[in-house]
Image (cartoon, rainbow, N blue to C red):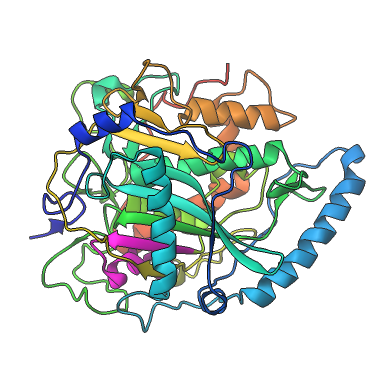
Amino acid sequence: PEINHHSSTKHSKHSNAVMSTAKKHSHSSPDNQSGTDETSTSERDAKRQCTDHNHGDGGNFLVSQEASADAQVGIQKINASQKLFASKFPSEQKNHHSNAIDGDVDPTFSKTIANAVWDKFSFLYPDCSTNSTIVAGFAVRTLEKGKDKLRVVALGTGTKCLQCNQYELTGCAVLDCHAEIIARRSFLRWLYRQLDIAGEPQSFAIRSNGKTPFELRPFQLWLYCSQAPCGDAAVYTLNDPKSKAVPCFSPPNNGVFRVKMDRDKIVRFEQKQSLGDIQHGNRSMCHECSDKLGKWFVVGLQGALLTQLIPPLYISGIVVGRVFSHAHIARALCCRSELALKRLGETIPQPFSLHHPRIGHWPLVHGHVRTKRSKYSLNWASGDQTAEIIDAKTGMKDSSGDPSRVSKKALFQEFVRLHENSSPALTYKEAKAQSSEYQKMKSIWVDAMSKTFHTGWCRNPTGLEEFTSL
């Protein structure tokens, strides 16, 4: 039988009691202005642990003529810094998952990333131990004045999804409160902040007169997960060759899409669902985190909305704590997509590309503790004074019942504010459809996965994306 190592009681989950205590003793972040949390890494690590950060073209947005001159200067500076960054961090285009049973990231660097994320979490919630929750965080790695710097910019925790009878049509409720998903939404908030102050010395973004209105300064993006993402990366039988480094595609269920809230149900064909079906008892088809991460390594982490503002942005590497199997994680995140696209002879259109991240492992220091899953989910982005707590049973802020700052509605409002040609009457669904290149790439990927693994992608219930930013 298959074992879901993500939901097994042998591995730690949130503790309601601990999280309740944490809410009472949360600390303010010291970097609420500059958004910097820096950790130095060694010269040896810098040379060994780097992958390419591919800035492609994309979008149909041009900046105003007034900004063109400054944009040209900014682009020239970015090009120069990219050359310097590339000389320090050599790019690797090939699949590098062939000779690393315990990961292809130096353990020292994996430890640095894991500690940086846990240190940030512990500062925000000092009374919450590393054994009481699942944490995910994003860290950016930069080269500043010749020094290798690492700063945590986004954080998320959580293990639950919204109950079907709590779904609503305004975009205010957060449907998926798993740690990786919340961390990614927090990272999107950080990106919007960078665009908001584009061109300023502390920003990672500048104005551009290319296909997108903004460009990002060169950096590596690393994801830390205290436990392997649920789904394909963490579901395997005891007989699977999980000790091998090469991604394995047997038994037949390896590589398929799965959904949450239904005991990791395998999705065999594309499924559409209505809000009425869900509210009358049918299970929500919310994809496992492995599937969502797999999509991000093809179409980019930025999503359909930000594709209209910046080039695709990819994760350079991932460090995992518990439930680590290099072969299964590599398959789930990127290698199953590579196999599917190659078998169909699909060519990935610019500005997108399939990225194979570095995969590292750093086990938690303390032993596993069996705890009851918490209903709370925390989110924080660099620049926030404190973390926000969401009640996963309602999808709203726990303290007031108000919409969360990581809800689709809140992120859509940020997009509309920055997109010069957006209309207040534009719906969230219509705004996503404007990213035609993004939608095309996603369709190519879904079709390739469907034909190769006999699996399907679940669409959001009709009506859930018809809200506006007002």
Point out residue 403 in the picture as x, y percentages from the top left corner.
43, 20
SS majority, magenta: helix
**Viewer-closest of 282 and 200:** 200
Locate residue 349 relative to residue 137 in the image: left or right. right
Position of residue 40 relative to residue 4, above or below, is below
Point out residue 67 in the picture as x, y percentages from the top left corner.
87, 41
Quadrant position of residue 395: top left
| Quadrant that contains the C terminus | top right
Q: Residue at x 50, y 37 (%)?
A: 29
Residue 457 visible: no
Locate residue 353 relative to residue 126 in the image: left or right. right
Q: Residue at x 82, y 53 (%)?
A: 74
Q: Which residues are magenta?
A: 317-340
Locate residue 56 relative to residue 356 in the image: left or right. right
Quadrant position of residue 124: top left
Outermost residue on the left side: it is 1
Please say whether residue 435 is one of the residues in the magenta stretch: no
Residue 341 visible: yes
